[in-house]
Image (cartoon, rainbow, N blue to C red):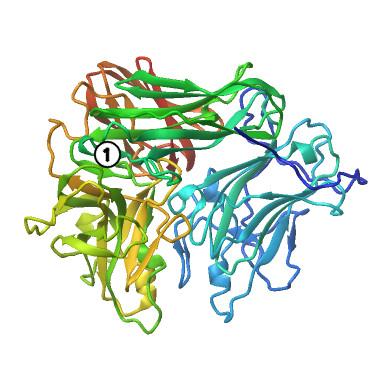
Amino acid sequence: MKKSTLVLSILLILASLGSQAQQKPSSPALKGDGKVFFYEDFNWANPADAKGWTMPAGYQLLDPDDIGFNFGWMPYDSIHSILTNEPPLQSTSGKNGYLGIFLALLNQPNEPRLTINNSIQFPHFNCSAHATVVVRYETHFMNGGPGLQQLQVTVDNGAHWANYNVGFGVNHKDRPNDLAPGVPAIFEANISDVAAGMSDVIIRLHWGETTLYFWELDDFSLAEAYNNDLRLKYFTAAWDNEVPDDLVTPYIVIPKSQLNGVGGIFNFESSVLNFGEYDQENVYMNLDITKNNTVIWNKQTTPLSVVSTFEQDTMKIADKFVPVDYGHYKVSYNFKQKEAEQTPENQQADFFFNVSDSIYSRSDDSPDLGWAYLLERYGDISVTSINDYFTGSIFPITNDCEVSSVSTYIMGGLADGKISYQFQIWKSETGKTDGTPYKLLTSEMVTLDSSQFNTWITMPFDKDGESEFLKKGDLVYAGISQWDLHEDYMVRRGKSLKIGTDRSIKQVGATAIGLYDGNIEYGLGSFVRKNLMCRLNLNDHGNRIDGTDVTGLGNSLGQNYPNPFRNSTEIAFELADGSDVTIEIVDMTGRKVLNRSEGYQPAGKHTMTIDAAGLDAGIYFYTLTAGQFTQTKQMIIY
C-alpha cells in the first residue's frame, strides 16, 4: 500500500486586500454542502466590440514573451487550420462561447513556431468566508508534445505560487481522458490548503512548453467541498501470464480455449483521494467480481484508520481471480469509509470482461475515441503515398488453436477511392515483441467506403492449411494495414483511415503494435499506446451464443449512441431477468429533466430512444433502474 500526501511548496503569507472579483450569480447550488460561490460561463460575446467580444473587468491576459498568443473568447463553432479540425466544445454553456487559445492557427504562419508561455488571470477572490475551496471547469485540448498546463494560485499577491498540474497526464496528440473531439473533460482540484479562509486569492490558468494545438475551457466555478468526499482517481489490474515482471493489461474478451487454469486477473489497484473537508476513518477498498448479477469473488484491503484531507492513498489486492468458464464478468472497485459518503458515484468504478468461444479482444464494443495511425505516421512532404502500414493488437497464444478471421471497428476516413485496407496477422519470430515479426495471414484488399463507418468489419483470411494453425507459445499481432494514395501529406495526416479505441481499463502494459517501413513500435510511450478495437477470431464455436454466458445474461447499461447528439440518441441495456424498467436523466446540477417508465421488460437485450427536444446543450447523466439493478452513465447534447 503506497501513501502520498499532496504537498505544495508554498509559503502562505497574508497580503493586504486587493481588488475583489464581482461575483456573478452562481449556478444552482449542489445538494447539501458543495455550494458554488463563483461561476463564470464566459458569455463574453459583444458585437459592438471590434474583436467581437469583451473581457470583463478584473481579468488579465499575461504574455511575458510578447508573442501575442493570448487566451480569448471563442464562439461556439468548429475550429480549422492546416493541422487541426475540431468540432465545437460541447460544454454545459457552450452555446454562449468559451475561453481558449487556437495555437495551431496562431502558429500557422510562423517558421519556426513560437512556444507558448501565456496565462489568464481571474479577478481577485475573497475566500475568507469559505473553509474549503474547490476549482472546477470543463475542458478539451491537445498538445504538441506533453506541454505544460497549470492552475496557479497565490494568496500573497504573487510572492509565492502554488502550481497544480491540469494536463490530465496526456502525451503528444492525446486528449484528456481519451475523450472524443468536442467532448469536455471535467477538471477538479481542492485548493483549500492554499485558498481557504484567505481574503485575497489570485488564480491563473497557464499554458506553456508547446507550439501546438489548442486549449478550450468553460463553466469555471469555485465551490465549497463536501464534508465526506472520497474520490477514486484511477483503477488498474493485470493479467498473470506466468512471466515474472511482465505486466499484461487484462483482456476484455478471451476465448475459453486460451484459459489454462493458471492465467487470471490480479494486482487489482486503485487510488483514493480525500477530496472533502473532513478526515475519513476506516477507509478500505472493496472488490467484487460478479457473474450473472451474482458476486462470485470478493476481496477487501485492510482498512486505514485515517485518510486525512488532501491525502491520496493507493490500495492493491494482489490475489488472483482465475476464470474457467464462459460468461460475462464485472469487476467493481468501491471505496468505503465510516461516515456516509456524499458523492458515492465518485468513489467507485468497474470494468467488464467476457469469456467467449471464438473472440479474442482487448476492447469492448463501444468506441471511446477514433484514432488514426497516419495522424503521426503520415510521411513527410516528399512522400506521395503510404503503403502497408500495419497496426494491431497483441495476442499471446496459450493453447493450440485455429484462427479464422480478424475484425476491426472502422470509424472514418476520406472515402474517395484512394484509401484501401487489408486485415493481417503477423507473428513474432521469437515469441517476444522485440523479435522481428513476419506477415503470416492476409485477407482480401478492400477500398474504404462510408458504408463501413462506425461498425465492426470482419474478413476471413486466405488460408494455406498450415499458417492458420497457431501453437502454444506463439505471439501474434492481429489488425489492419492501410494503403493511402493521397499525394498531399496533410490529407493523409488529417483524413486517413480511423479505427476505434477503447479505454475500459488503464493499461499496465503494451496492448498494440505498429509496423511501418521496416520499423516496429509498441509500448506505453509509443504512438500506438491505445487499446485498439481489433479482434482475433478463432475457429471455435463451443458456446451456442458466442460471447454470451449460456446460463443466463447479465444486467448492463450501454453507452448511448450517438454521443454527443443533437436530436435523439439510443440507449441499449441488457436484463438478466424480466423486470420493470425506468430511465431517469438529470443535468449537471442534479435537476431531473426526464423520468420515463418502460414498463415490464423481459430478459434479454433492449434499446430505447431518447428525444432531446427541449433540452439545452450540456452534460447529462442517465440512470437505468431495473429491479435491484441501477447503473448511471454520462451523455452530452450539443
Residue at the bottom extreme? 382
Q: Which residue is drawn at 53% across and 46% down?
A: 185
Residue 284, how many percent across, how many down?
57, 23
Quarter of the figure that contains the N terminus:
top right
In this picture, is 603 found above or below 406? above
Number of marks drawn: 1
Residue 616, how many percent across, how many down?
48, 40
Residue 497 visible within the image: yes
Q: Tell me which amino acid carries mark 1.
A: Ile
Which type of secondary structure does the marked residue at label 1 adopt? strand
Residue 249, how many percent across, how many down?
40, 44
In this picture, is 63 found above or below 533? below
- The answer to whether residue 132 is left or right of residue 479 is right
Residue 595 visible within the image: no
Q: Name the residue under label 1.
A: 254
In this picture, is 271 found above or below 123? above
Q: Which residue is drawn at 20% across and 70% down?
A: 417
Residue at the right extreme? 16
Residue at the left extreme? 465
- The front one of 409 and 57 is 409
Residue 160, how many percent across, how many down?
84, 52
- The answer to whether residue 117 is left or right of residue 11 is left
Based on the displayed image, in which of its 4 quarters is residue 67 positioned?
bottom right
- The answer to whether residue 307 is left or right of residue 623 is right
In this picture, is 495 found above or below 408? below
